[in-house]
Image (spheres, rainbow, N blue to C red):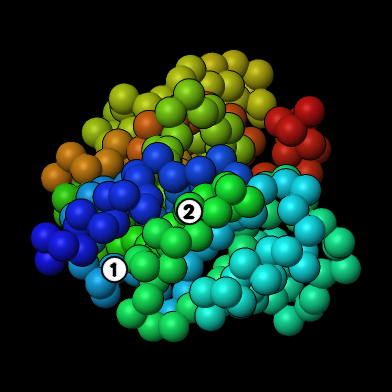
Amino acid sequence: MKKINQQHARVATATSPLNTSAKAAALLLPLLFANGASAVTNPIQDTWAQGRILVQPKAGVSVDSFNQILNSHNAQTQGHLGQSLQASSSDAVVRRGQTHLINVPKQSELSTIKALLRNPNIEFAELDMRVTPSQVSANDTYYSRGWHLNTMNLPQAWMSSMGENVVVAVLDTGVDADHPDLVDNLLAGWNIVSNNADVTDVFGHGTKVAGVVAATSDNSSGVTSIAWHASILPVKISNLSNGSAYWSDIARAVT
């Protein structure tokens, strides 16, 4: 294990060039995975893809030259990231920022990377690391009943944002301003029908919707919302006891 760690320390680092050269491929990772840097600090062999590595040749190197370099190490490209791996590129030279997925003999990943890095035509070569999914959960009473939370991949999304500095207008029957799960996230609202600030919810639907959107969460009470720290702007479009609203009031609320 110590030998593997020493070898890997010489061929790749946590601040890999892939982080800047393959931004398109990396854009999906923040909502789905934790930071992969920690995964390469103390690697073991099953934490990277077997039989393939990531290689970026320097811009301007001919495709033929790149292929010859790979062939000399018993390796071959599947194509570059962002390109269909089944399609062959018509480029005569390598373009800037093209990171290739390279097939190599299994168990040779580290030695092949080490050899490629000695070649002046190679920008970088590194392991295709495996990262572990990460997520956030909440301790609210009814968290387990929130079937929609996992359906919407919210435990992963919460790693990036919980709705800070976001205002959500809820056009509905009003909101219960004294609800303990809502009081901290409520703004002063407006009643479109009565043309005043009374947004008392006499039907209950608006309060439920507001709770789904931005109830205070992870407080050992009630439900878990979609955007824990978003603000709710109640816009009351109905004064009727059955919660029904007229199109005209809805339209005025939107405009």
Circle 1 sits in a helix, a strand or a loop, which is it? helix
Q: How many residues crowd around disc 2 within 10 Å: few (fewer than 14), some, or many (20 or more)?
A: some
Q: How many residues crowd around disc 1 within 10 Å: few (fewer than 14), some, or many (20 or more)?
A: some
Q: Position of residue 93 (x, y in %)?
A: 81, 56
Left/right of residue 16 with respect to residue 36 in the rendered view: right
Residue flagged by tag 1: what amino acid is it? Thr
User: To which quarter of the image does residue 45 belong?
Assistant: bottom left
Q: How far apart are marks 2 and 1 (CA)?
A: 21 Å
**Total number of numbered discs in the rendering:** 2
Circle 2 sits in a helix, a strand or a loop, which is it? loop
Residue flagged by tag 2: what amino acid is it? Leu
The tag on residue 117 is: 2
Image quarter of the C terminus: top right
Identify the residue at image location x=71%, y=31%: 253
In this rendering, the answer to whether 187 lies above or below 66 is above
Residue placed most toward the observer, 165 or 30: 30
The tag on residue 47 is: 1
